[in-house]
Image (cartoon, rainbow, N blue to C red):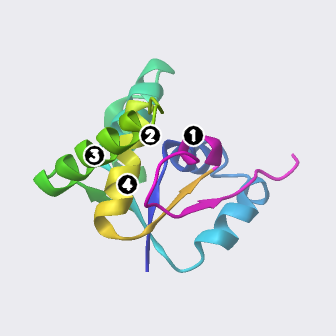
Amino acid sequence: MELIADTTVLIDLWRFRTKRLRIADLVEKVGNASLVVPWITQAEFSRGALFKGVALSDLAPFYSGFLIQAFDQRTMERYCELWVEMARAGKAPDYPDLWIAACASTRGVALVTRNPKHFKNIPHIQVVSYELGVP
């Protein structure tokens, strides 16, 4: 089984990599699923890490535990279809989140996130949400 990882998943796995109790709900919800990291999720996370002073080369071992989903024609077409459907319904989608949703929709798998509200109006996707534990 696979799950598409939203950027919040990478942020939490990085931030709490030594404090596993904080991400116990995430670990429980993911279970034995493989986390797929879309190119846009990787880009968002890497951009933030670089801004915080983390060298991009230091992220390579972190990313090695994930299946990285490259940009492809099918995902681009799905993104366009979702955007048009939402725009016609009067809902202006957030671009990075819609790209992540298109990756999940194209693969036919659920998306895991700590921010389900970012995906609530996007049709044709299943969202698995989690919460951080108390420190």
Badge 3 or badge 4: first in the primary sequence:
4
What amino acid is found at the position of numbered circle 3 in the picture? Answer: Tyr
Q: Amino acid at mark 2?
A: Asp
State the SS at label 1.
helix
Q: CA distance from mark 4 to mark 1?
A: 17 Å
Circle 3 residues within 10 Å: few <14, some 14–19, many ≥20: many
On screen, residue 123 versus residue 130, left or right, reads left
Q: Residue furthest right?
A: 134
For image coordinates 75% across by 53% down, the residue present is: 131
Amino acid at pointer 1? His
Residue at 49 percent across and 76 percent down: it is 33
Q: Does 106 appear in magenta?
A: no
Residue 70 showing in the rendered view: no
Question: Which residue is labeled 3 in the image?
Answer: 79
User: Which stretch did the figure color magenta?
Assistant: 114-135
Nearest the eye: 103 or 8 = 103
Q: Rounded to the nearest whole Å, what is the CA distance between mark 1 and mark 3?
A: 15 Å
Task: Indicate which label's residue lies in the foreground, 4 or 2.
Answer: 2
